[in-house]
Image (cartoon, rainbow, N blue to C red):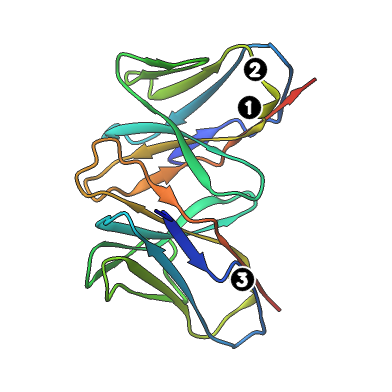
Amino acid sequence: NAGVTQTPKFRVLKTGQSMTLLCAQDMNHEYMYWYRQDPGMGLRLIHYSVGEGTTAKGEVPDGYNVSRLKKQNFLLGLESAAPSQTSVYFCASTERTSGNNEQFFGPGTRLTVL
Amino acid sequence: RKEVEQDPGPFNVPEGATVAFNCTYSNSASQSFFWYRQDCRKEPKLLMSVYSSGNEDGRFTAQLNRASQYISLLIRDSKLSDSATYLCVVNIGNNRKLIWGLGTSLAVNP
């Protein structure tokens, strides 16, 4: 049981390049989330999904797209990377029926955009 | 006003000390409350949920005051391994979206 995994762990992009971050969970969780964490800003929700085939915008969705084609995977795409997207990206998941709302996080992806 | 506010610290305490953190939230419709712990360059992990009647887990005690809209975390007999950032988290909806505080940094010194 690997929990939540993220690929890649580190990445350096040039401005304008595109990339996809992959999140996978093996806990059969319905809900999945993408956050970014920046110094002094805390965790901010980018997009989330309440089930396979559904996605919704979070607090800071601009410049990102997501897809949830399979229940266990949640992809985050950057179509044209900008230096403002330099951040640590965390994926998380939780059960639909969980009373305590515990979110399980992946180890993060450290992205630098030059 | 931020939806969830915490004193960023850092709190520097000696081993064995008792330390308390407070957190205030602005949305009176907030439904559930949590403390997460985040170690340096690691992902957040749930420390404990916070229940209306207050709850304890070993050396950790969490309390909720709905009237004043704050929650607290008390750590007794601090250990070096307690050094981390403690994140106050609030849920205000049914879609499991969480609102995160910026965290309070704790350093426990030998």
Q: CA distance from mark 2 to mark 1?
A: 6 Å
Q: Amino acid at mark 1?
A: Asp
Subunit bearing disc 2: B
SS of the residue under disc 1: helix
Query: Can you tell which quarter of the image residue B29 is in?
Result: top left
Mark 3 or mark 1, whichever is nearer to me: 1
Q: Which mark is residue A84?
A: 3
Q: Residue at x 46, y 28 (%)?
A: B24
Query: Can you tell which quarter of the image residue B70 is in?
Result: top left
Q: Residue at x 51, y 44 (%)?
A: B44
Give coordinates of residue B89: x percent, y percent: 43, 37
- In the displayed structure, does residue A4 sit left or right of residue A11? left
Q: Residue furthest front?
A: A1
- The residue under label 2 is B78
Q: Are marks 3 and 1 in contact (CB under 8 Å)?
A: no
Q: Residue at x 24, y 51 (%)?
A: B95
Give coordinates of residue A80: x percent, y percent: 53, 85
Q: CA distance from mark 3 to mark 1?
A: 33 Å
Q: Are marks 2 and 1 in contact (CB under 8 Å)?
A: yes
A7 above or below B81? Answer: below
Q: Is any atom of residue B55 visible in this view? A: yes
- The residue under label 1 is B82
Query: Can you tell which quarter of the image residue B21 is in?
Result: top right
Q: A33 or A10, which is in the foreground?
A: A10
Give coordinates of residue A111: x percent, y percent: 62, 70
Q: Amino acid at mark 3?
A: Ser
Q: Are marks 3 and 2 in contact (CB under 8 Å)?
A: no
Q: CA distance from mark 3 to mark 2?
A: 38 Å
Subunit bearing disc 1: B
Q: Residues within 10 Å of mark 1 (few under 14, many from 20)?
A: some
